[in-house]
Amino acid sequence: MAEALAECRRRIAELESSKARLEEAKEATGRNAELLQHLLGALEDVVWAASADGTESLYINEAAERLYGRPRAAFLEDPDLWQKVVHPEDYEQAAGSSENLLEKGATKVDYRILRPDGEVRWVRDRKYVVYDQDGRPLRVVGIASDITDQKETQEALRESEEKARRLSEAAFEGIVIHEQGKVLEVNQVFAKMLGYESSELIGTDGLALLTPESRELAAEHIASGYEKPYEAVMIRKDGSRLPVELLGKTIEYGGRSLRVTAIRDIRTRKRREETIRRQADEILEISTPILQIQEGVIVTPLIGTLDNERSQRFAEELLTAVVETGSEVVLIDITGVPTIDTVTAQHLIETINAVRLLGARVVLTGVRAAIAQSLVHLGIDLSDIVTRSSLAAGLRVALEMMAGGI
Amino acid sequence: VAAENVSVVKVRNVLMVTVPSGPDDATVSELQEQVLHAMADHEAKGLILDISAVEILDSFFARTVAETAQMVGLMGGETVIAGMRPSVAITATQLGLTLGRARTALDVERGLDMLGGL
């Protein structure tokens, strides 16, 4: 009996100690659950759990009230509420997040929601399936993050890029953005100029669009960061050449050295330049006629001033005429020269000396009073050249020379 | 460098020399040498240098010609440079090259006329 009693006491003590342990464990579990609650409540993102079939809401944290602007209880009562608050335009995307979720195991979708206060927020919705030990779906958990700020920044960036693109499309010039020659971006104008589609040019070597000579120049300018306009020749898709004016500017962007180049078609300008040059040539020719007035005597009336280029041409033509006609006397008439300065005089003297080297003699005529005065005042010595005031007087001298007089 | 062969021809009492198209310094010096010897040998009254083949005139050539004309003058003769090309004449004046007291003629024929008229 005493033994049985002792056994009973021992059992009671055992039970009491195990009860205490149980209490302790219960308390610890409660503390852990509380800690978890605190953590979930402190999260900015919405965290929730639902039954695997989606018909029962099991849990949702405080963040839901901040993001959706609705009480947590509403979500727990209505498992489909999250879908009802989706922005009508994004309904399809949102529905896609729970479609075939059990097969896929996880989904991630961005969409907009409408809050009761009318505000629109962007939400990134991630859903995961939790499985039991046998691999059967146990429940579904999810995280919903507010990505409104991120989306707005992206949208602003897209808009500013779109604006820049439209601006470059509106430009009359071709525009290319490249990095060490590699094309990153072109506008329509540029692509059209060369007969390509924009997409054909992006990623290619922009320097390959230039003729070899221009390529060298452009490469030098890129290397030195040259920022003034220069002319070059580009090769169109059909192989034809296109004269252009290039104006590049180097910009540092995100640690990269990008170059923005504006390209202008200068065919019209080139044609005009060519016309002007040809007309100038014609004027030069017209202004210095060379006339043979008698066997062995030629006359050339000079009109206008003699600059370097004209003087060179004049000398060449006059000397050629002397040789071709075998003329021994050349009359240069300067009646049509308005004023004479040291440069014009120097050119004249050089031409006269060159004619003399050929073996012909020169008479300078048309030395009017004003010209005589400026020649003396400028200290130009023409004493070894035969000069006369009028062409008529010069002609008489020439004829005397031919007759073997002087 | 061997000098190109330069031949001095005497027509009546005038010496005639045809200068090759691109005379080098040695040829030019040789030319002067031969001309002076011929002057002494023939007591010619003049020299005609036909430079119609010459395409480039350098300062050495111009100076030698001017010197030769001066030497020929001292020996009692007159020098005529004949047939200079227009391009050569223009280059010569631009470089400021002169031929000293040598006279010029359009071609050899006119050069002969000049000397014949003496």
Image: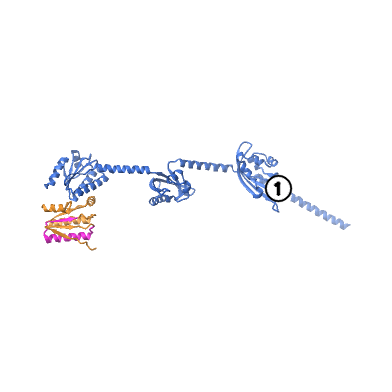
Chain colours: A blue, B orange
Q: Secondary structure at mark 1?
A: helix
In this orientation, does residue A258 appear? no
| Percent x, y of residue A313 | 25, 46
Tag 1 residue:
A33
Q: Chain of mark 1?
A: A
- Residue in the picture at 33% in, 44% down: A274
Magenta span has B36? Answer: yes
Q: Exactly how many numbered labels are in the figure?
A: 1
Look at the magenta stretch and give its main secondary structure. helix
Q: Nearer the viewer, residue A42 or A381?
A: A381
Residue at the image position 43 percent from the left and 41 percent from the top: A172
- Above or below, comparing residue A168 to residue B63 in the picture: above
> Residue at the bottom extreme?
B2
**Vertical placement of residue A380 versus A3, above or below:** above
Q: In this picture, which residue range is highlighted in magenta? A: B22-50
- Residue at (22, 59) in percent of width and height: B25
Q: Quarter holding the N terminus of chain A? A: bottom right
Position of residue A385 measured from the top left corner of the image (x, y, whole percent): 17, 46
